[in-house]
């Protein structure tokens, strides 16, 4: 019995040592991994119009393409059938009308989207939002009123036969 007890004590020490070694190797691997590259908003949206962080624009903007704003913009933005994205360094002081709006940076103004507004964890909106769907991620900052007005479901109208006279 004593030999069996000694065997299990010795076996337990070897297993504990291996587990400890594996944990430290895993920690070293985790530390040596390069940070995951964040995909560029313009690449994600296949945006043709991109305003980089060093761009400052004021005025009326009408776009027939997806649009990414990482700079400073003041005025009004319309992209009725497309997506407008305010990147993480974007600062927009404008009302935005688009099919979809994604906010990673800051927007001061009202947003109206036909489909969806996404306010990411790093995004800030001061203004009202009107869209079929509004997605506020944990950590997002919002001050205003949200009006969600999803498109009505298709209704099939059946004409009933008039009652017999």
Image (cartoon, grey):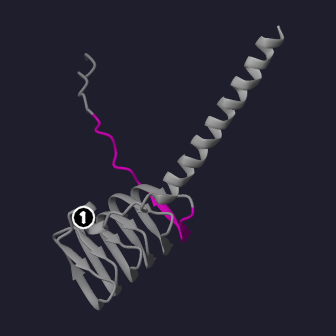
Which residue is found at the position 34% from the left and 79% from the top? 70
Q: Does 151 appear above or below 129? A: above
Up-down relation of residue 50 to residue 122 (above or below)? below
Element marked by disc 1 = helix
Q: Is residue 92 left or right of residue 159?
A: right
Depth order, front residue of 92/104: 104
Furthest residue to the right?
Answer: 2
Number of disc labels: 1
* Snapshot quadrant of residue 91: bottom left
Q: Position of residue 42 (x, y in %)?
A: 26, 68
Location of residue 19 with respect to 46 vertically, above or below: above
In magenta segment, residue 130 = no
* Secondary structure character of the magenta stretch overall: loop
Please give the residue where the numbered disc 1 appears in the rendered image: 43
Q: In the displayed orientation, state which residue is furthest to the front.
A: 3
* Image coords of residue 26 (percent x, y): 54, 47
In magenta stretch: residue 151: yes
Identify the residue at the far top of this view.
1
Give how far across and how far down residue 148 sits, in percent: 45, 56
Q: Residues within 10 Å of mark 1 (few under 14, many from 20)?
A: few
- Residue nearest the observer in this picture, 130 or 99: 99
Q: Tell me the residue at 24%/28% (across/down).
A: 158
Instruction: Give the quadrant of residue 58.
Output: bottom left
Please provide the residue range marked out in magenta: 139-155
Asked if residue 122 is positioned above or below residue 29 in the image, the reply reads below
Question: Residue 165, how many percent across, how many down?
Answer: 25, 17
Residue 19 picture quarter? top right
Q: Which quarter shows the N terminus?
A: top right
In-front residue for pair 138/92: 138
């Amino acid at each position: 019995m004593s030999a069996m007890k000694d065997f299990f004590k010795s076996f337990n020490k070897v297993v504990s040592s291996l587990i400890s070694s594996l944990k430290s190797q895993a920690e070293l691997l985790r530390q040596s991994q390069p940070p995951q590259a964040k995909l560029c908003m313009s690449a994600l949206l296949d945006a043709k119009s991109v305003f980089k962080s060093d761009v400052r624009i004021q005025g009326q903007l009408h776009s027939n393409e997806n649009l990414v704003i990482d700079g400073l913009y003041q005025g009004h933005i319309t992209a009725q059938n497309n997506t407008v994205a305010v990147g993480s360094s974007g600062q927009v002081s404008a009302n935005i009308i688009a099919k979809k709006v994604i906010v990673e940076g800051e927007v001061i103004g009202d947003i109206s989207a036909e489909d969806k507004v996404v306010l990411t964890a790093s995004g800030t909106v001061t203004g009202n939002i009107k869209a079929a769907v509004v997605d506020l991620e944990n950590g997002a900052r919002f001050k205003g009123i949200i009006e969600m007005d999803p498109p009505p479901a298709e209704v099939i109208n059946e004409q009933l036969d008039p009652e017999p006279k």
